[in-house]
Structure formats: structure tokens, C-alpha cells
Image: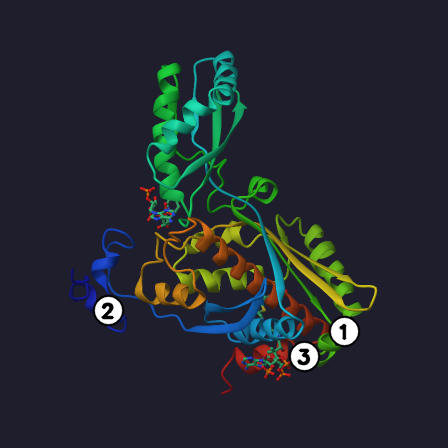
Amino acid sequence: MKPMKEKNSHCIDDVPYKHYDWARVVGQNCENIVGYVPVPVGIAGPIPIDGVEYPIPMATTEGALLASTHRGARAISMCGGCHSVVLAEGMTRAPVVGVPTLAEAGALAKFVKEQFPLIKAAFESTTRFGKLLELKPCVVGRKVFLRFRAFTGDAMGMNMVTKGVDKALSVIQEHFPKMEVLALSGNYCTDKKPSAINWIEGRGKSVVCEATVTADVVERVLKTSVDRLVQLNIDKNYIGSAMAGSLGGFNAQAANVVAAVFLATGQDPAQVVESSTCLTSMTKTETGDLIISVTMPSIEVGTVGGGTGLQAQHAMLEMIGCAGANQAQPGANSQLLSRVVAAGVLSAELSLMSGLVAGHLLSAHMKLNRKQH
Ligand SMILES: CC(C)(COP(=O)([O-])OP(=O)([O-])OC[C@H]1O[C@@H](n2cnc3c(N)ncnc32)[C@H](O)[C@@H]1OP(=O)([O-])[O-])[C@@H](O)C(=O)NCCC(=O)NCCSC(=O)C[C@@](C)(O)CC(=O)[O-]
Ligand SMILES: NC(=O)C1=CN([C@@H]2O[C@H](COP(=O)(O)OP(=O)(O)OC[C@H]3O[C@@H](n4cnc5c(N)ncnc54)[C@H](OP(=O)(O)O)[C@@H]3O)[C@@H](O)[C@H]2O)C=CC1
């Protein structure tokens, strides 16, 4: 396959297109191709996560972001690393269907709960790896939203789940012949939009990551104090975000790391919306050290499918040690990637919050994020 370079060459001469594996791209990743847009990629860390060191690959054009994440990772590493827990996982898809009466809407909601095994079997007949975990109905007048939640192994799972849902709906329709599928996605999923449902119930991987950073390292590496960090976390990430009416934005810069790791590892960049919802917590221990954690209920990542098979993105996943499908334990690779994302966010939160307390944000960005003319 040759890209459409010649056709549009009057305006896209500077867009590179050579030396790219187009055969892999076509039919999976892009249409109307004119080339590719190179984005610089760097590596923060490594950072020990649950006793093993991992690099954090990040693609970005924001100078100071890698330096900041690296500093946070270094401070955490000096104190023994971080710990993570994947609390839950499950990709969701919620079609909206219409029925002729409210009574039928109620009956449908009851049916999907009572006949879950039947629906699960239909869903799982479409995939080797997908496992339907839950089906939550939401009745609004004569419309019913059906939020399917499934384990998707090492895939992020949107195609997989949508395929399974389509099949499940055809089985439900046999029992509700007047049911009309209005759309395979009814926004109650919720994919690529801010929503309280993902923040409260989770989507993709729900991960918490924590580290204890000694007061000495806070002072030497981060140039601030535990007390000042804890206080700013309350003022900025809790009170400031509350006053702004924030939805899952109780953090300083989670989206910075999520976006950069997503680009570097072939994730769907639009899912940064919900994947970067995060609450950053900071407390002081009895011995005066800092406990910092990030709680991230909807990290949507995969190590197979999407852009994860592209050469450079695959190489980044290989470097972490989670490329492709985990044959021994499907899902273990994508879980590891979600923990690396959370550890990167933890590092960046620690460093930016320290930079803000110390008054270094502007000077760091003037030095690393703007060319001196
Ligand atoms: C820039 C630093 C790290 C300097 O930090 P520093 O403490 O002055 O630097 P240092 O020279 O003393 O070095 C300390 C460690 O930082 C790292 N480090 C230091 N410099 C580099 C570098 N050039 N390249 C790579 N790593 C670097 C490195 O790990 C080093 O240790 P070493 O390994 O040398 O022993 C610090 O001032 C900082 O982190 N500032 C905050 C900047 C930041 O977080 N920017 C992120 C984007 S802000 C944004 O987009 C979101 C925002 C702000 O709008 C959100 C909001 O509303 O809050
Ligand atoms: N359809 C939609 O509505 C949306 C699609 N997307 C896009 O969907 C794509 C991602 O979809 P996704 O389903 O993740 O990927 P793919 O569509 O690439 O499908 C991945 C498939 O890989 C197979 N597979 C092999 N090994 C494993 C393993 N260990 N674990 C899991 N699956 C394995 C599975 O096949 P099998 O199931 O046959 O067993 C799985 O369905 C991205 O490009 C994203 O941008 C994003 C948002 C919405």
C-alpha cells in the first residue's frame, strides 16, 4: 500500500511517509493516509513497582514533563519504590434500546438480570478471551440502557465488547421482538466522554498506586517539605478541584502522563478523557514521612489490538515487558501496563506538586519548555 502522498503533495511535503510499515496500518489503524507525525519519546524512571523496576515510556512535546516524572520516579525509587493494586477490571459498552411501553421496559430490565447466564453465553460465543461479568440496566421512560461489563484479557476491548454486545442483543430480541436497538452505544458506557459512572463504577482497570517518600528525600530531591506538600494537596487537589466542580480531576497532571504513555505504547488517545480521572492523596506518617497515592478508577489500556502492534509502540511495550498477549495468564500484560501508567502518574504528581510548592513551575518551563531567543 502506498500512502496518498502524491495526491496531496502541495501541502504535505514535510510529512514523512517512508520507512513505515503501512501493511500493518491499513485495515486496522488509519484511512486516507498521507504519512505519519513523529512525536518525541523519552523514558522516565525506571521505577520499582511491587519490587520490580520498570521504565515509563512517554511521547510528548511538553518540555519539563519527562524531567518532572523522572524526578518523581527517582525520589520514589530512593525510598524503595511504589506498590500497586488492580482493584477491578472490565470494559463496558451500553447500547440504548427502545420498547413500546414502560411495562415492557421494566420487564426487559428484570429479564436481563434473571437471564444473565443466557446473555453471557451469547456474548462469550463471539470471543476466545472476553468474559461477561455484569449487565446493569437503566430504565428511562420507554428506553433502556444496558451497560455490559466484560473482562477483555490483554485487549483494551472496545471492539471485542461491542461485538459480544451485538450478539447478546440479538438473543434478548428473541424474547422482546418489539425491542428496537436504537444504537449500539448509548453513552451510558461511557466511552471518550467525562462521566460520573466511570469515576464511581470504574471502566478498564481500576488501579491504586502508593509510595512512602522519606522527609529527607522530599527535601533533597524535591526541594520542599512534607507539611507543605500535604497542605497544598488539600488546597489544590481537593478544595480547588471541588470549587471548580471537577469530575474526577482531583489531581494535578494525571492526564499529562496518561496521554504521553498512551501515545508511546499505541493506546487509543481519546480514552485519555476517562483514563486520567484520578484522586491524588497525601498524608504525613507518624515519623514525618510522606505517603502519596493515586486512585485511578478507569485506566483503559491493552497490549494487543489498536496501535499496540505498530513497530515503535510495540518496542516500547517490549521494553516494559508486556508486549502482546500473555499466553500463560491472559490479561496479565495489560494489567502490568495499567500499573506502569499509575506509577508514572504517581511520580509526576509528586514532582509537579513539589515544583508548585517550591515556586519552580514557571522557571522549569522557561528552561525546558521554551527555546531562549
Ligand atoms: C524540572 C524539575 C524536574 C527540576 O527539578 P530540580 O529539583 O530543580 O532539578 P535537579 O537538577 O536538582 O535534579 C533533581 C532530579 O530531577 C530530575 N531532573 C532534573 N532535571 C532534569 C532534566 N533536564 N532531565 C531529566 N531529569 C531531570 C533528575 O532525576 C534529577 O536527579 P538526578 O537523576 O540528576 O540525580 C522541577 O522543577 C519540576 O519537576 N518542576 C515541575 C514541572 C512539571 O511538573 N511540569 C509538568 C507539566 S505542568 C502542566 O502541564 C500542568 C499544570 C501545571 O497546568 C497542571 C496544574 O494546573 O497543576
Ligand atoms: N468498536 C468501537 O466501538 C470502538 C473501537 N475502538 C478501537 O478498538 C480498538 C481496540 O479494540 P480491541 O477489542 O481491544 O482490539 P481488537 O479489535 O484488535 O481485538 C483484539 C482481539 O485480539 C484477540 N486476542 C488475542 N490474544 C488476546 C489476549 N491475550 N487477550 C485479549 N484478546 C486477545 C481477541 O480475539 P477474540 O476476541 O476473537 O478471541 C481480541 O478480540 C482500538 O483500535 C480502538 O481505537 C475504540 C473505541 C470504540
**Contact? badges 1 and 3 (CB < 8 Å):** no
Which residue is identified by label 1? 215
As shown in the figure, which amino acid type bears the numbered disc 2? Tyr
Q: Earlier in the sequence, mark 2 or mark 1?
A: 2
**Contact? badges 2 and 1 (CB < 8 Å):** no
Foreground of the two, 256 or 92: 92
Label 3 SS: loop
Q: Is residue 280 left or right of residue 49?
A: right
Give me the C-alpha separation between circle 2 and circle 1.
50 Å
Image coordinates for residue 118, horizontal then vertical, percent: 41, 23
Give me the C-alpha separation between circle 1 and circle 3.
10 Å
As shown in the figure, which amino acid type bears the numbered disc 1? Ala
As shown in the figure, which amino acid type bears the numbered disc 3? Val
Q: Residue at x 48, y 58 (%)?
A: 337
Q: Is residue 109 above or below residue 338?
A: above
Q: Residue at x 67, y 59 (%)?
A: 293
How crowded pointer 2 is (Cα within 10 Å; few <14, some 14-19, many 20+) is rated as: some
Q: Is residue 297 left or right of residue 92?
A: right
Label 1 SS: helix
Q: Would residue 176 be seen by someone viewing this image from the given angle? A: no
Foreground of the two, 301 or 64: 301
Asked if the beta carbon under badge 3 is closer than 8 A to the nearest atom of ligand 1, the reply is yes
Which residue is identified by label 2? 17
**Contact? badges 3 and 2 (CB < 8 Å):** no
Image coordinates for residue 307, horizontal then vertical, percent: 35, 57
Which residue is identified by label 3? 221
Q: Is residue 166 above or below residue 215?
A: above
